[in-house]
Amino acid sequence: MNQDFVRLILILIGIAIGTFLVISLFVFIGGSKNPKRYRPGRPFHFTPVWFLSAPEQQSRAGLTAPVHSTGRELQASSARPGRAARPAETGGASDRW
Amino acid sequence: MTAGELTQDPASVSSEPAQSSSPVGRVAHVQHAAAKAHGNPEVLLGPLSSRALLRLDEALRLADASTGLTFSVYIGELREPVREDAEEMLFRLADPQHSVLVAVSPNQRVLEIVTGSVASTRILDRDCKLAALSMSAAFAGGDLGGGLVAGLAQLAEHAGRP
């Protein structure tokens, strides 16, 4: 009787620990799949990128290679070019979060 | 060339790590957006997932095609003063008067929308502010890709057809 009770307790504890380990494993796997998720307020390390959908527009910017493209590809530049002249007025908006 | 093949300008390829403060550097060009995550290390190191890249690619193409303007998205650090830095980036483009730049700095939590002189007549500042509010709300929730796509769609809608 006493041995059965101890065995039952051990089984219940084993189930609880096993469930905890399985859930922890899922959480760990799920978290490592997308490590570059942005979380405001936390450091976010990434390579700066600059996207344009019109490669032929980039010739002056020095952003792109001599492109033999259809003009429909997304372009990515890892580095920012230097400063440029500012010949005209601009519009737009600014915001922070 | 097959889809997903990576092409790079030999003159622009460098072994140095990419830094936001570096001058004109490496440029990677991927033949198809769907292949970016598999073939382009530059994009892999970027802030967006492959799914977000696909959505952003589509949003940029739609915005350009429907408005006749050139939309551009920069994600990275901005030098102070950030507004002037973003404006200087706009004027790096071939036709800044007809261009719209969305510059996002996640770590600084700053968003700048810069429109060229012609683009600003089609997308008014208050329209830009509305788009900026929408985008920053998404960014505050950690959704960079979704915020950019929504913002580009709003800007393109306000710009209308050429």
Image (cartoon, coloured by chain):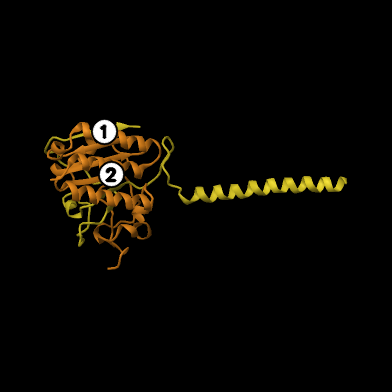
**Which label number is shown at residue B74?**
2
Rendering quarter of residue B110: top left
Q: Is residue B66 above or below residue B139?
A: below
Mark 1 secondary-structure assignment: helix
Q: Is residue A70 above or below residue B99?
A: below
Q: Hey, what amino acid is under mark 2?
A: Tyr
In this view, the residue farthest toward the bottom is B1
Tell me the yellow chain: A
Kindly identify the residue that appears in the image at 35 percent across and 34 percent down.
Answer: B137
Q: Hey, what amino acid is under mark 1?
A: Leu
**Position of residue B58 in the picture relative to residue A13 (left or right):** left
Residue named by callout 1: B130
Q: In this view, does A91 lie above or below A17?
A: above
| Front-lying residue, B117 or A13 | A13
Tell me the orange chain: B
Residue B60 image position (x, y, % from top left): 25, 49
